Image (cartoon, rainbow, N blue to C red):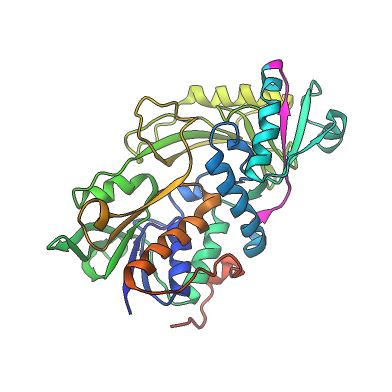
Amino acid sequence: MEHIIIIGGGIGGAVAHDLCLRGFKVTLLEKGALVSGTTGRHHGLLHSGARYVLHDLETARECMVENRILRRIAPEGLEQNDGLFVALSDEDMSHRPDFIAQCRAAGIPAEEIEPAQALRLEPNLNPELKSVFRVPDATMDAWRLPMHFFATAAFNGADIRPYTEVTEIIASANTVQGVNVFDHRTHRTYAIKADLIINATGPWSARIAAMLGIDIPVRPVPGVMVGVAERLTNKVINRLHPADDGDIIIPQRQLSLLGTTAWLGEDPDDFDLPRDQVQLIMKLCSEMVPRIGQMPVHSAWMASRPVIVHDQNADPTKISRTFDCIDHAQTDGIEGFVSLFGGKATTMRAMAETAADLICAKTGRNISCSTQDRVLLHYRCFFRPGPKKT
């Protein structure tokens, strides 16, 4: 049985889940707590894809497909509340025809509703609405949803090791053989042998690849998010224009999370929060929901997205949020090493399917993906002692 090491405790949980179902031995390594990186720090939007239709149709299609799948396999990790795209200005209205056409092209059901109806649904919206579309956005729990994947992977035999940092990738004759790790709990260093390694570390992917002298086109794109201590809407609210700063409001329990900003970063561990962006987000989101302008900031934080960047001068809000999976035997002559990067939390299952398909092809296994229809175990199962499949 081939032994696969997955580096990364975010989307890596979905990869572990898929590989276990296909009969591989799986060890997952995460240098900190599970879901402590980008995957657990986003604002919690289960994308319909409508946010991307005006500039990134590929990602929009990916999101709508995965939105439907996650509603089936992990309903307890979601609030299936839908979203509204609101036009407030003539500039917003100029995007309306393209928004309708591109939603249709991406397979996203976008229903135009009367502003009066939108105000009945969401009384805190700006009453100066010019046009409103209802789409199948939803709210996900940024921590609980990925833990559903970890719980199911662990039940099916995955060896999941948090606080275990990879310090070196062991390779000989251009073939990976395993990793050296440091256990932050026991302060012990040891080696783990493997047949294949998957680098699924998000914005840290380039750092892991560099251990083998490999360069991959991923950059951290940090963004600021803000929370206010009141649930001001029950649906996700987006501004009807190409995705930009401060144009989304997401209800999370009794909070409203406001976002976001984006700039090209260098270090995914740089969490120096720009305070001016907090005020910018508050100002821009108050145009959609005026009450925000009267509220104090409850919390503010940052996360670095792993974004595929080929043009270093590109506008980070317009760069595609699609994903890539690279077999470095094909691109760099390093056998047994695969990098999976880019993407969204919404597309983590699809990313895992792509990586597992590649691993099956490399190992000669003709086993198709079944994660589209396998209902995941509840996240609490990860913490309950009990029998595991082996």
Residue lying farthest to the left in this orientation: 173
Residue 355 visible to the viewer = yes
Q: Residue at x 42, y 35 (%)?
A: 221
Q: Is residue 364 depicted above or below 237 in this figure?
A: below
Q: Residue at x 53, y 42 (%)?
A: 58
Residue 294 visible to the viewer = no
The percent coordinates of residue 313 (x first, y second) are 37, 24
Check the picture and name the quadrant holding the N terminus: bottom left
Please say whether residue 88 is one of the residues in the magenta stretch. yes
Check the picture and name the quadrant holding the C terminus: bottom left
Q: Residue at x 55, y 64 (%)?
A: 148
The percent coordinates of residue 204 (x first, y second) are 34, 46
User: Would residue 55 be found to the left or right of residue 76 on screen?
Assistant: left
Q: Residue at x 37, y 71 (%)?
A: 26
Bounds of the magenta span?
77-90
The percent coordinates of residue 359 (x first, y second) are 36, 66
